[in-house]
Amino acid sequence: SQSRYGWQESNPRKDKLHMVYAQELYEVRKRKGVMKAEAERLMVDHNYFAAMAVHRGDADGMITGATMNYAECVRPVLEIIGAGRSKVASGLNIVLVKDKMLFFADTTVSIDPSADQLASIAVHASKVAKYFGLTPKIAMLSYTNFMGKTESPRKMQEAAKIVKQRYPDLIVDGEMQADTAVNPGIVDRIFPFCDIKGGANILIFPTLDAGNIVTGK
């Protein structure tokens, strides 16, 4: 229920939905090694309780991570809610630079995503950009500009091709370096054939290493 200060804090152990959620967790995870008693114990955890609330439609979303490490926060989300039809979970950082909003992905989940996974990650990020009223302009990042001679650049080139094939209306290009992606002057001067004009607002990183180095996480 709501109070004058917003939603009241719920104690999963005492909540009337505790046993309902525990039973549903058991049904979802019983073939993954979770016994009924374990489901009841896990549902005392606020993250499991919140994830189940979202899964059942009793909540629209959940906020977590302020007091726990990342793995503990994301595990119940993946176990209960899952990644959807695409089967790709990804993390995204929003960076505000003066009057610009930039989206970095994947910065939290995928260690070394494939070209197909990177394409799905890019599409997911584009939906977030659209939510904020922006036209998505996606740059597939690597350490080279439009060369694709080694494994990582080739992967990013392939990811860009996959996005173009599946969503021809999306603006996407790569592989390219980060400064090329966000600096319109470099593109206009050196790479006029690049489909991204005016600077990219979605930067897709080739690995989790690269994403975390940039975001400083």
Image (spheres, rainbow, N blue to C red):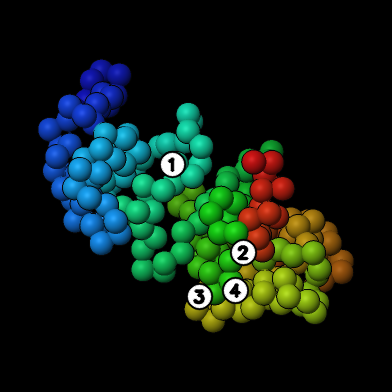
- Work out whether mark 3 precedes mark 2 in sequence or the reverse, and give the earlier one: 2
Q: Nearer the viewer, mark 1 or mark 4?
A: 1
Give how far apart the Cα atoms at labels 2 and 1 are.
Answer: 21 Å
Q: Which residue is mark 3?
A: 167
- Work out whether mark 3 precedes mark 4 in sequence or the reverse, and give the earlier one: 4
Give, as a three-letter code, the residue at label 2: Asp
Give how far apart the Cα atoms at labels 1 and 3 are.
Answer: 32 Å
Q: Which residue is mark 2?
A: 112
| Direction from residue 186 to residue 172 in the image, left or right | left
Q: Which residue is mark 4?
A: 115
For numbered disc 2, what is the local secondary structure? Answer: loop
Q: Which residue is mark 1?
A: 73
Q: Position of residue 127 (x, y in %)?
A: 47, 59
What residue occupies the far top of the structure in this picture? Answer: 4
Give how far apart the Cα atoms at labels 3 and 2 are.
Answer: 23 Å
Give how far apart the Cα atoms at labels 2 and 4 are.
Answer: 10 Å
Give, as a three-letter code, the residue at label 3: Tyr
What residue appears at the point 76 percent right and 57 percent down from the top-left corner? 178
- Work out whether mark 1 precedes mark 4 in sequence or the reverse, and give the earlier one: 1
Give how far apart the Cα atoms at labels 3 and 4 are.
Answer: 15 Å
For numbered disc 1, what is the local secondary structure? Answer: helix
Q: Position of residue 141 (x, y in %)?
A: 71, 63
* Whether residue 60 is visible: no
Q: Position of residue 49 (x, y in %)?
A: 27, 39
- Depth check: 214 or 128 in front? 214
Q: Is residue 44 above or below residue 183?
A: above
Give, as a three-letter code, the residue at label 4: Ala
What residue appears at the point 25 percent right and 27 percent down from the top-left corner? 10
Q: Nearer the viewer, mark 3 or mark 4?
A: 4
